Image: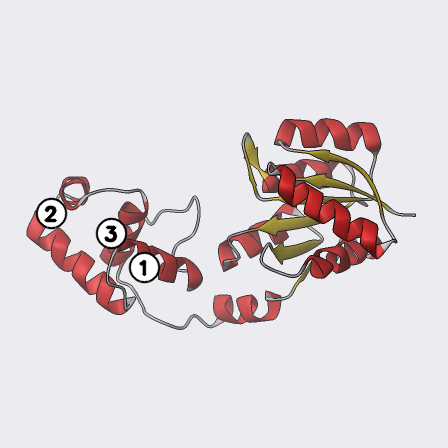
């Protein structure tokens, strides 16, 4: 029977996944881990056939786990889970060497199905939204932001105030407010939170990547 290691910092999530795999009956859950460090140790000790890991972990990212495990064990199946199912995370999982990518709001049966795929084809990436994400990457749609508006968007994501943005970009507060207003208009947003959520959904805001000034 194929074996699986579950990696998530929330015990309730791990328990739910464990029950789903036990109910499916075609995987043996070898163990659990809640951190990157623990995941690497447990994977080395237990040698599972598949690792299911959350992206957000207390001491790093599930993508770190994915990259390190893929380098060490090319034939290992790796399923990445995330609460934030934007294109940035999907392509991050693909680039890290994951076998499958599944949003956490998916039915648990989809996680088990992804683990089956990962076991059979560990080096063939699978994601429900892959085709649409590729289409969005190749043919961008939606609002087109100017270079300055993109800079303002990333500064808003960093939590900067109008005064902070003004100082950072060497512009007046009035000009900064104008850029923010235009940005909100393009994103059909009434406040910062709405603007950031819409930008993430449209792939206009990518984790760890800031536009040059």
- Whether pointer 3 and pointer 2 mark residues with C-beta atoms closer than 8 Å, the reply is no
Badge 3, how many Cα within 10 Å: few under 14, some, many 20+?
A: many
Label 3 – label 1 distance at C-alpha: 15 Å
**Where is residue 39, by image quadrant?**
top right
Label 2 – label 1 distance at C-alpha: 24 Å
Badge 2, how many Cα within 10 Å: few under 14, some, many 20+?
A: few
Q: Position of residue 161 (x, y in %)?
A: 19, 43
Q: Which residue is mark 2?
A: 171
Among numbered discs 3 and 2, the one appearing first in the sequence: 3
Which of discs 3 and 1 lies nearer the camera? The answer is 1
SS of the residue at dot 3? helix
Q: Relative to residue 144, is residue 87 drawn left or right?
A: right
Which of discs 2 and 1 lies nearer the camera? The answer is 1
Q: Is residue 76 above or below residue 202?
A: above
Q: Which residue is mark 3?
A: 152
SS of the residue at dot 2? loop
Which of discs 3 and 2 lies nearer the camera? The answer is 3
Among numbered discs 2 and 1, the one appearing first in the sequence: 2
Q: Name the residue located 69 percent from the left edge and 55 percent from the top edge.
A: 100
Q: Is residue 51 above or below residue 134?
A: above
- Whether pointer 3 and pointer 1 mark residues with C-beta atoms closer than 8 Å, the reply is no
Q: Which residue is mark 1?
A: 194
Towards the viewer: 104 or 128: 104
Q: Position of residue 198 (x, y in %)?
A: 37, 62
Label 3 – label 2 distance at C-alpha: 11 Å
Q: Name the residue located 73 percent from the left edge and 26 percent from the top edge.
A: 41
SS of the residue at dot 1? helix
Q: Position of residue 187 (x, y in %)?
A: 29, 66
Q: Is residue 18 above or below residue 36?
A: below
């Amino acid at each position: 029977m194929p074996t699986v290691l579950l990696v998530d910092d929330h015990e309730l999530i791990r328990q739910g996944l464990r029950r789903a795999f036990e109910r499916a009956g075609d995987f043996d859950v070898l163990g659990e881990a809640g951190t990157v460090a623990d995941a690497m140790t447990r994977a080395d000790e237990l040698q599972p056939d598949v690792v299911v890991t959350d992206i957000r972990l207390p001491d790093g990212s599930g993508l770190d786990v994915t990259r390190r495990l893929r380098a060490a064990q090319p034939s290992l199946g790796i399923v990445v889970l995330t609460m934030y199912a934007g294109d940035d995370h999907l392509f991050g999982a693909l680039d890290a060497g994951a076998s499958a990518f599944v949003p956490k709001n998916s039915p648990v049966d989809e996680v088990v199905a992804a683990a089956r795929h990962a076991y059979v084809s560990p080096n063939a990436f699978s994601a429900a939204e892959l085709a649409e994400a590729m289409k969005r990457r190749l043919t961008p749609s939606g609002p087109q932001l100017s270079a300055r508006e993109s800079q303002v968007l990333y500064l808003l994501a960093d939590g900067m105030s109008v005064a902070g943005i003004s100082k950072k970009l060497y512009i007046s507060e009035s000009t900064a407010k104008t850029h923010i207003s235009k940005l909100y208009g393009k994103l059909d947003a009434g406040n910062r939170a709405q603007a950031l959520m819409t930008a993430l959904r449209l792939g206009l805001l990518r984790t760890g990547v800031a536009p040059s000034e």
